[in-house]
Structures are given as structure tokens and as C-alpha cells.
Amino acid sequence: MKKELAKRVQRIDSKVDRMRMRRKDADTLKVKENVFDDPTLKTLYTISNKGIINAIGGSISTGKEANVFIGEGKDKDIAIKIYRISSSTFNSMEEYILGDPRFRNVRRAKKDIIFAWTKKEHRNLIRAKGAGVRVPEPIYAERNILVMEFLGEDERPYPLLKDVPIDKENAKLLFETIIRYVELLYTKANLVHGDLSEYNIIVDPRTMEPIIIDMGQSVTLEHPKAGEFLMRDIENILRFFRRYGIEMQAEELYSTMKEIKQKNQ
């Protein structure tokens, strides 16, 4: 039995090596050990057999809990987000999952939390997109792997808001759009991002349109800390845009969103 499993894992590993054919970089071997453990290889194998992933390229983002790789989908580039099972701590995840009624029955084992988090981000992206918020289009989620639309050019992702050169005119437009997205999340999607800042907003440099990313921690309004998270999101955005001369009160924006929400109920 063990020999059969070992052979199967070897075949999966070889399959993933063949899939990762477009681009190899200096970090490939270093990344592989932490990300592509046996369960993840099996999941990638399953997803590739479904025709969702044709090839995996290099790592385009490395976070505390996950790596994002560029890949080839059926007819376009995709982003493959892999939450690391073996080397992630996820100390802050329970705050967002416990209290979200969608995940009331999630066990506290690390693996179960990671799987729930991946599913949660997929669902949050669907709800956000349905509310009119620009986010990466979710394609598929299984276990610790989330497949999304790739947003970038020439295999390079769009830059983070913090790295984009902005004049005052564009700053005003960006600010207004981001606040509008926060409002749409709250009033239409019944979500609060929960960790919004210049580090998880990317910008399409061709149109200067902001795109919200990293929605794994986003919570529904039933979450006991939803109001606290909303205020923190607003304050983070105001803090960033003050450097461009934009001055508004967080309490005022918060109250306006609450009023819009009440009118829509």
C-alpha cells in the first residue's frame, strides 16, 4: 500500500513539474519545498485533470500564509493561490472565521481552518463581484488552492496601490472609487473586507482603476466585529490618501454607509 502511494505521489510530482513549464526562476526550488507538499500536489493533479490548470509558472506573490503563481488556464492566464499547510501559522485567522455564520461548524484543526479560509475567499469574491466591486474573478477552489483571474500584463501582476505614481487628480478618482467599493461591499454584498489598505488594492495602470484583492478575511455583517472592521478599513484608506490632500472624517463615511444600508433594507 505504501509503495503504491509513493508511486502515485511521484507521478503527481512529475505531472506538476511538467505543468510548471513556462517559467522557472531562482525561487522555484526554495518555494517548492514549502508549498508543494504531497496533499497539495494531489489537489493540483485533480484540478489539472479537470482542465482548469494547464501550466504553472513562477511565483508572483509571497505572503505570510500563501503563495500566488501565474498559470495557464483554458483560454487565458490565471492566478493560482496556494495556502501553505505546513509552514503557515494562521494565528489571526480564527478572529475572522469564528463568528462568521457560514463557518460555524469548522473544526479548529489547522488544516480545516485553511480549507475553510480558501472556500471563504472564493465565496467572498463571488459576492463582491456580484455587488459590482472590481475583484479578481474567482474560477475554482479546492482544499487549499484558489484559482482566479490573473490581473496584469506580460506575466506581471498589476502594481499595488502603494507603488503606483499618483497625481492629485487620479488620487481623488481612486479614493472615490475605493470608498464606493467599500460601500458596495457593505450595502449590497453584506461584507466587510476586514483588512483593506494600500497593500491589498492593485491598480490597472491603463485606466487607474482600483481592484480589491485578498478577501479571505472578509466577514459577513453578522460577524460580531463587522462594524469595528468597517471602521478600520475606512480609517486605513483615509490615512493613505491624506498625503494627497484628501481630508474626510472616518465617522462621517461610516455613518453614511450605515444610513444607506438601513434605507436598502
Image: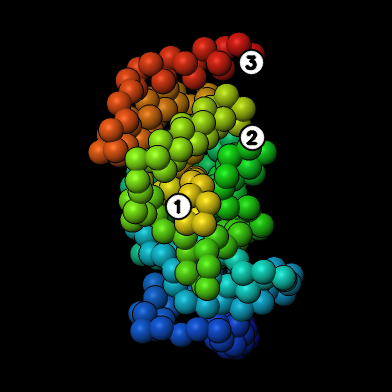
Q: Which residue does the image show at 46% across and 85% down from the upper left?
A: 24
Amino acid identity at mark 1: Ile
- Quick one: label 1, few (<14), some, or many (20+) residues within 10 Å? many
Provide residue 181's location: percent of width, then percent of height: 52, 35
Kindly identify which residue carries mark 2.
Answer: 131
Q: Estimate the spatial distance between the alpha carbons at disc 1 and disc 2, rounded to whole Å.
A: 19 Å
Provide residue 136's location: percent of width, then percent of height: 58, 52
Q: Which residue does the image show at 51% across and 31% down from the upper left?
A: 180
Against 205, residue 14 (above or below) is: below
Q: Determine whether label 1 and label 2 are within 8 Å by CB.
A: no
Q: Mark yes or no: residue 215 visible.
A: yes
Q: Mark yes or no: residue 117 visible.
A: no
Amino acid identity at mark 3: Asn
- Quick one: label 3, few (<14), some, or many (20+) residues within 10 Å? few
Provide residue 22's location: percent of width, then percent of height: 55, 84
Which of the 4 image quadrants contains residue 17? bottom right
Marks 1 and 2, the one that precedes in the sequence = 2
Kindly identify which residue carries mark 3.
Answer: 264
Against 64, residue 265 (above or below) is: above
Q: Estimate the spatial distance between the alpha carbons at disc 2 and disc 3, rounded to whole Å.
A: 14 Å
